[in-house]
Structures are given as structure tokens and as C-alpha cells.
Amino acid sequence: MPKAVAKGKKPAPAPYPKGKQVATKAKNPLIEKRPRNFSIGQDIQPKRDLARFVKWPQYVRLQRQKAILTQRLKVPPAINQFTKTLDKNTATSMFKLLNKYRPESKQEKKTRLTTAAEAVAAGNKADQGKKPVLVKYGINHITALVEAKKAQLVVIAHDVDPIEIVIWLPALCRKMGVPYCIVKSKSRLGTVVHKKTATALALTEVKPEDKQELAALVGAIKANYNDKYEDTRKTWGGGLKGLKSRHSIAKREAKEAREIKI
């Protein structure tokens, strides 16, 4: 039989190397450490950005989906022309001119009619005065003015819904030789005529002191819209891919480029 191996004492482990001794901060016995527990029914969760998880109202979802669809799908030129709006400086000077010819508000009209009625009741003849020079609005009225070539300038909103209400108006203006422009937005046009929104506005005449300003505006607008109509008529919109699609295509192209080099 083999001899049993004698069990000797194990040597003591080597002491740990002495490092820098860090001075421990004395804990205050009065302050108890209470770690938070974020499991269900415990501590209140920390604030996070929950925008992705919000159930947005239907109108918000629809307008966001519409904006993305107009980027992804191919947009015909007749609709795409409404994305090319007037530049900020020209639009500002144009609205300054339009605000000079705002129609009277309901309160102003009431005051005028009351004054005229009081004058008639007193036996005096009501003074109607000259016909005021005002901005024209209402799509049917503006159409008639353009067809009669009475409009000197037509301003169309870019966000009319449904777009079919005004989609034909630029073509009609060009055919009749009437300067037109597309601006942001229908609510901004509405403020000029004391309404919530307005699809289009038109100027038929202005006072003598504003004729030079109108001529300068018409010159700039014609150069941007009427003269470029043929280019606009051929320019399609949309067809833009999303961020993920662009990245995947770029990866694929980079991979193909590497394979060609090899």
C-alpha cells in the first residue's frame, strides 16, 4: 500500500502590499442613508422626456404624417409650387402695403352706419363720400377680378386645405398677365381682412403715394413667379428618403466601393 502523504501546515499568505492609506470621512450618525427604490409602487420615478410615448391629438398626428408623406412621395409640380414661398424681406414690405388698405372691421362698419342713420333721421342727407380703396378677398371675387384683368397683385396662401381651392389660380394669373405670389400663411392673410384665415387677397388700385412702392413689389414678384412659371411647371417635389434609408444606402454604397477596389 502506498504511504499516506503527511499533511503539513500551510504557509501563511503573503501580506497585501501597503498602498496609500485614504483617510475615511467620518460619517454623521444622525444622517441615515436611504437609497431609493424605483420598482413598481416604490419611489417616484425620475423625470424623463416622454415625447415619444405621448398619444398626440389626431390633428397633430395627421399634420405630421402629411408633412412626412409630402417629403417621401413624388409631388406633382402643380402642388409643389406652393412650397416656393416669397422671401421674408419682400413679404414684410408687401404686408406693410396691404395693411394700409385693410377693410373696415364690424365695429367700424356699425359706427359708420349708425352715424349715417342718425343723419338721415335728423333730416340731413347722408354723405357717402368716395368709394374706399381696399384689399379684396374671397376666392370667387378674386377669380372674377383676375378674369376681368382688374387685379394688380394677387397674394395666395401656401397652406390652403384642400389645395384644390387655389391650385389653378397661379395658372389663371399667368394667363391673364396678373402678378401673383405665394406667401406663408392663410392665417397671416386673414389678419389683414379681420378673418381667421383667407385663401387669397388682391389689390385692384392704390393711392397715388403708394404707386411707386407697388410697382417695385410687382417687379420683384414677377421676376420670382410669373417669369419662372415654365420652370415651376416642370419641377417635381418630394422623393426624399428618411434618415435610416439614407444611412443604409450609404453603407451599401461604401461596401460596394470597397469590393470594387479589392
Image (cartoon, rainbow, N blue to C red):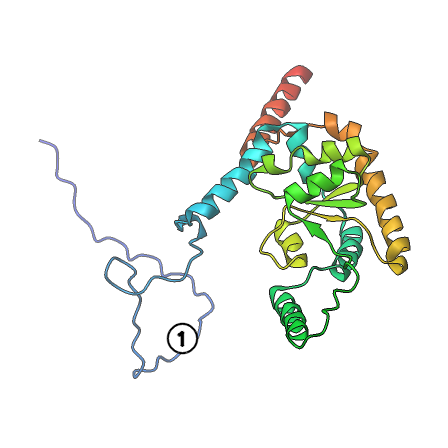
Residue under the image location 8 percent in, 31 percent down: 1
90 in relation to 235, above or below: below
The percent coordinates of residue 233 (x first, y second) are 73, 27
The residue furthest left is: 1
Number of numbered labels in the structure image = 1
Q: Which residue is mark 1?
A: 24
Could you say which is closer to the camera, residue 121 or residue 95? 121
Q: Nearer the viewer, residue 139 or 260?
A: 139
Tell me, yes or no, if residue 157 can be seen here: no
In the picture, measured across the screen, residue 63 lies left or right of residue 239, that is left
Q: Quadrant of residue 33?
A: bottom left
Q: Is residue 204 above or below residue 14?
A: above
Specify the farthest residue to the bottom.
30
Residue at image position (60%, 43%) is 160
- Asked whether 113 or 4 is in front, the reply is 113
- Within 10 Å of disc 1 (Cα), the crowding (few <14, some 14-19, many 20+) is few
Residue 187 position within the rendered picture, expressed as x and y whole percent measured from the top left: 61, 53
Find numbered disc 1 in the image and state the secondary structure of the residue it sits on. Answer: loop
Amino acid tagged 1 = Thr
Q: Quadrant of residue 174?
A: top right
The answer to whether residue 229 is left or right of residue 254 is: right
Q: Quadrant of the C terminus?
A: top right
Residue in view at x 73 percent, y 31 percent: 171
* Residue depicted at 30% across the width and 60% down the height: 38
78 is higher (above) or lower (below) than 105: above
- Which quadrant would residue 255 be assigned to in this image? top right
The answer, for residue 192, to whether it is visible in the render is: yes
* Residue 213, image x, y percentages: 87, 55
Percent coordinates x, y for residue 260 in the rendering: 66, 15
Is residue 249 left or right of 149 when viewed as pictured?
Answer: left
> Which of 114 and 226 lies nearest the eye of the viewer?
114
